[in-house]
DNA sequence: CAACAATGTTGACGTTGACATCATTGTTGG
DNA sequence: CCAACAATGATGTCAACGTCAACATTGTTG
């Protein structure tokens, strides 16, 4: 590891900034994120980050985007290797989402923070939408298997996504005080599944 | 212009700071909140806010707290004057919550932001809990009416609250692009109610 | 009315994000 | 091969910020 003492060019400052920024985000929170400190940590001048991110906000946008991309990848991976029934698959996705949220609380906050540059926001929403779309597919699959009631998969997904994201958001912000890390996740998932379940006996008359 | 030209004492600077801060929060976002600018706006010196909030964070904490208190009051008010059936009441609470969230997106973000001073965080969680508790009661009521399945009201509430808060959070952060302001709220509420509904045939009277 | 606490003012310090200007490097066409 | 050139980094500067300490003014209370 002959880390060259002082190469004039860093090599990949942009990526290094994102990595270090995320560490700082996790360790000290969004408020403690300073471009200058990042530069100091990486041994470059205080204005060097400006070459790669026009703004502090631009760095935050990039961070949020990478968060959505990673979360999407996690969901993809988990969807591929999780159980057979729809219920098990959905549960796996939900747990993955919540786990990401609690392991990256500050990042999640940033991802869903309303204040993004409009241009970056577009890319962000697109990435988030790709994640969302996976749940739509999952639910469509469940419908084909007869494990999910009929109806617009998008609409059903919105409700499911809201519940999962809501739980994750509450957990990430420390609003679920009592028990272990996943205090009422089982109940919440159960409830979601109940909302999706097909009617058992169609009410002939009422 | 009765406004006394330059009284040395402001009268109620603390309250004025909170009011103005919330306006700024709404108009220009959390990042654009500056103690010095607040002081300028209110015609006091740049250090005057320090007499009422030891920190910038202390002001943010107070802002978040007042947000929880107001949201709690809104829910109380709406619960008192909403329809008779459990379903209607729950729907009213959900719409109130979502409405608050979209009308105060930045404030909601702040309220559920993980970074509060531990002391303030306690008061915050307590206030949030009081709001939460109202839903617990509502659900208990629904159970007594036979409109909600049996089971720990706290657990059921967590699922309901997650779904409502999740939808609100998504809406507030601009992640629900397509239709009107309440794109899929109906569906989400329907889904929640379905998750709460008792098994099989509901006993019509009691 | 004399202390006193509460509140506001003034001035200063160190940090930050942003910008303009200059320096170094890697690349590429003649 | 080397002379432009674009990328990238360094340096210096600026205004704004949060925070603090020292001081001024006010209202209250013994």
Image: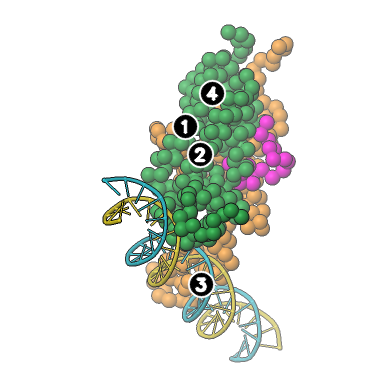
Chain colours: A orange, B green, C yellow, D cyan
Marks 1,2: beta carbons within 8 A: yes
Local packing at callout 4 (Cα closer than 10 Å; few below 14, some 14-19, many 20+) is some
Residue found 56% across the figure and 14% down from its top: B145
The local secondary structure at tag 4 comes to helix
Looking at the rendered image, the disc whose residue lies closer to the viewer, 2 or 3, is 2
Residue found 55% across the figure and 27% down from its top: A191
Residue A85, compared with residue B204, is above or below; it is below
Residue found 65% across the figure and 27% down from its top: B190
Image spot of residue A76 (x, y percent): 58, 44
Could one spot residue B89 in this view of the protein? yes
**Residue denoted by label 3:** A47
Looking at the rendered image, the disc whose residue lies closer to the viewer, 4 or 2, is 2
Q: Is residue B171 magenta?
A: yes
Quadrant of res A154:
top right
- For residue B138, the mark is 4
Mark closer to the chain start, 4 or 1: 1
For disc 3, the chain is A
Mark closer to the chain start, 4 or 2: 2
**Residue denoted by label 1:** B130
User: Is the N terminus of chain B in the top left, top right, bottom left or bottom right quadrant?
Assistant: bottom right
Image spot of residue A49 (x, y percent): 52, 68
Image spot of residue B42 (x, y percent): 53, 56
For disc 1, the chain is B
């Amino acid at each position: 590891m002959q880390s060259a003492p002082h190469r004039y060019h860093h090599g990949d400052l942009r990526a290094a900034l994102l990595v270090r920024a995320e560490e700082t985000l996790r360790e000290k929170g969004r408020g403690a994120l300073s471009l200058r400190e990042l530069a100091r940590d990486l041994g470059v001048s205080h204005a060097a980050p400006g070459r790669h991110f026009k703004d502090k906000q631009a760095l935050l946008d990039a961070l949020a985007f990478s968060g959505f991309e990673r979360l999407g990848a996690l969901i993809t991976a988990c969807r591929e290797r999780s159980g057979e029934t729809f219920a098990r698959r959905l549960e796996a996705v939900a747990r993955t989402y919540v786990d990401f949220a609690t392991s990256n609380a500050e990042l999640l906050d940033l991802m869903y923070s309303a204040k993004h540059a409009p241009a970056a926001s577009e890319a962000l929403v697109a990435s988030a939408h790709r994640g969302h779309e996976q749940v739509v597919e999952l639910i469509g699959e469940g419908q084909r298997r007869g494990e999910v009631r009929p109806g617009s998969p998008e609409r059903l997904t919105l409700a499911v996504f809201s519940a999962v994201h809501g739980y994750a958001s509450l957990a990430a912000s420390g609003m679920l005080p009592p028990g272990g890390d996943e205090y009422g996740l089982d109940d919440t998932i159960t409830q979601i599944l109940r909302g999706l379940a097909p009617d058992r006996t169609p009410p002939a008359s009422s």
